[in-house]
Amino acid sequence: MGQSPASPSANRILPFNKSGYIGTCSVFLRSDCVVDGDTFYYQGQKIRIADIDAPETDSAQCASEAERGERAKRRLRELLNEAPFELHGYASRDTDRYGRKLRIVTRGGRSIGDTLIAEGLARRWSGKRLPWCI
C-alpha cells in the first residue's frame, strides 16, 4: 500500500470544488490543469502526487514511455474531474526539489495514485526516478 498521510484530518486540504474543471496544461493554461501523469496545477499551486511516479511526456526517453505518459496524463485528468477529491500532506516533507507541493490525492479514502498503479499507468514512488524504457 502507498504512503498514507500521517493524520488525514490534520493534513487535509480543502476538497476540490466539483463546479470547477481540471484541463490539460499548455503554454496558455497553467491553472487547474494536468501537466503529466503525476503533476497538476490546483488553485495556483503545482502539485506532485507524492505516492507515485508516472512516465514522462515532454522528456520521454523512448516512444513507449511517451505513449504511456500521455495515457497517464489523460487518465489523471479524468480521475480528477470525476468527483470531489482531497489533498493530504505527505508524511515526510511538504515540497520536492522543484518546489512542487507533495500531496497524496484521495477520493473516498483511496489514493488516486493507487488507481493509476492498478491500471498500469504509474508505479509506486521509490524515492528516485527509475527508467521507463527497457
Image (cartoon, rainbow, N blue to C red):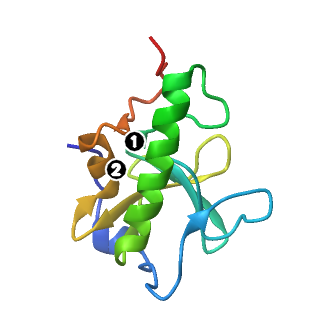
- How many circles with numbers are drawn on the protein? 2
Residue that protrudes farthest toward the right in the picture: 28
- N-terminal label among 2 and 1: 1
Circles 2 and 1 in contact, beta carbons < 8 Å = yes
Mark 2 neighbour class, 10 Å CA radius: few under 14, some 14 to 19, many 20 or more: many
Q: What amino acid is labelled 2 in the image?
A: Gly
Residue that protrudes farthest toward the top in the picture: 134
Q: Locate residue 86, reporting x and y percent.
A: 37, 71
| 13 relative position to 3: left or right | right
**Residue underneath mark 2:** 113
Relative height, residue 55 to residue 100 (above, below): above
**Residue underneath mark 1:** 52
Q: Which mark is residue 83?
A: none
Q: What amino acid is labelled 1 in the image?
A: Ile
Q: Which residue is drawn at the image coordinates 43% and 84% (left, top)? A: 18
Q: Which residue is drawn at the image coordinates 64% and 40% (left, top)? A: 97
Q: Which residue is drawn at the image coordinates 56% and 34% (left, top)? A: 56
Relative height, residue 83 to residue 6 (above, below): below
Q: Locate residue 4, reporting x and y percent.
A: 28, 53
Quarter of the image with the N terminus is top left
Mark 2 to mark 1: distance in Å?
A: 6 Å
Nearest the eye: 131 or 46 = 131
Q: Locate residue 57, reporting x and y percent.
A: 60, 37
Tag 2 secondary structure: helix
Q: Quadrant of residue 61?
A: top right
Relative height, residue 11 to residue 26 (above, below): below
